[in-house]
Image (cartoon, helix red, strand yellow):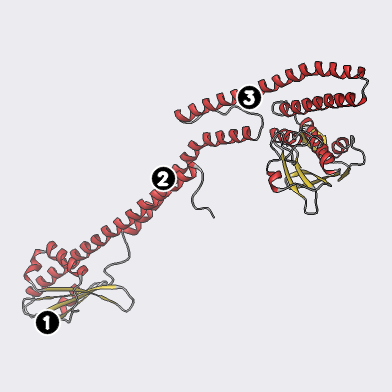
Amino acid sequence: MRLWPTGLVGRTMVIVGATVLLQVLASVTFYQLIDREAVREDHARRIAELLVVGTRVHSLDSNPQGNDLAQVMSTTYLDARITDVAPQRPSMSDGGAMAIRRYMVSWEPELARHELIVWTLRSRSGAQDLVGAMQLADGRWLSFRSHDFAPTWPLALRLTVMTLLFSAAGLFVALYLLRQQGEPLRHLAQAAHRIGEGRRPEPVAIEGSADLRDLGFAFNEMQRRITGILEDQARAMEAVSHDFRTPLARLSLASEFIEDEDAKTILTDNVAELDTMLNSLRDYLRAQHQPSEPGPVDLAALLRQVITPWPGALRYEGPENLAATTHRGALTQALIQIADNAVRHGGGGEITLTTDSAGPLIVVRDHGQGMTAEGISHIYDPFFRADAARQRNTAGFGLGIPTAARLLKRFGGSMDVSNHPEGGLLVTVRPPAAT
């Protein structure tokens, strides 16, 4: 599981969340310290008041036996009694108890005239009790024990809960605002992906902060210029192709007057090859900008129509009918290129039509030898051919698969090329969906 997000907004959210968590931990620690001091001070005040009351009651009693004083001072949380000797106390110093004693003397200065000892003990239930004794005027000792004088976070717990609630609300608002701020960046990323896949560029919405709006303006201008360059490139190629056809037609006509059959064959073959090359290049460039509208298509009938130029070389396998809404023109041109490649380089094969959870799926398998991993990694490169020497006795110009991939991606389809385990090349096509 990835703990550190890759996106800018995600990383910012993690940083904000970590900052809020650190603030909460610091606040809880601070509240605990405040709570401990508040509990000590409050407890010291209450016990100090009881001790002062006890000493005054004892001084007014003409026959002090200690029972009345013990009853006056004993409460639900405090047990008091009179003893003749000082109670035994631990030899180790108790910082918390000493702090309470200082608070007691500070709150009731009268207690400074008496010997006062305080320490803490654990009760059988595990609670922390405050135990102490104060020497009275007659030399006896007033012993007391305050039960569970330090309950767990009575004040800090409430403050902690409030801090957590406010922090959670603040974090939620911060994450929401960060997500809203990151929305223009996500739109830019999606538009960039569309350009990279050769799909039709669409202007992004100009939104967000001033910097993001400037970035949106610049991005739209870049898309416009890229689209213009590609269209100019295609128009230039169309013009070159048109101009080349005139001299090619003259050469083809002139070949009829050549008496030497070998020379005539060489000339006509080269003219035909140049003409095919121009057509292939024109189709590749047109695939980048040609328009297309989605509509209802019977994919089974379309595939049977695609394989008609190669009777016996390609075989259709699939349902009799399968309706879908897709870009007929782009899908047809892409499948023709793939089928032609299967016949030229694989000796024919099968075209299978199936469906899965994502929709229709077209699989073309040829009967060739397949390709190396290196060759498959470059198969979408224009003019790439599996034979490194690019011998002219191998048909094709290395534009069929790139043209098919460009057509499919432009309208939202996909194409994957791999080797079949039993031999041959496997081309998996996901038809463009209507958007």
Q: Which residue is identified by label 1?
A: 65
> What residue do we see at 69% from left, 28% from top?
288
Between label 1 and label 3, give the one nearer the viewer.
3
Q: Amino acid at mark 2?
A: Gly
For label 3, count other residues whose C-alpha is less than 10 Å away and answer few (under 14), some (14-19) or many (20+): some
Q: Which residue is identified by label 3?
A: 227
Q: Residue furthest bottom?
A: 84
Q: Can you tell which mark lies on residue 361?
A: none
Report the Cα–Cα distance between label 2 and label 3. 44 Å
Q: Is residue 219 left or right of residue 35?
A: right
Q: Secondary structure at mark 2?
A: helix
Residue 6 vertical placement versus 87 (above, below)? above
Residue 262 in picture, x, y percent from top left? 90, 27
Nearer-the-camera pick, 210 or 332: 332
Residue 74 in picture, x, y percent from top left? 21, 74
Q: Which residue is identified by label 2?
A: 170
> What residue do we see at 89% from left, 37% from top?
310
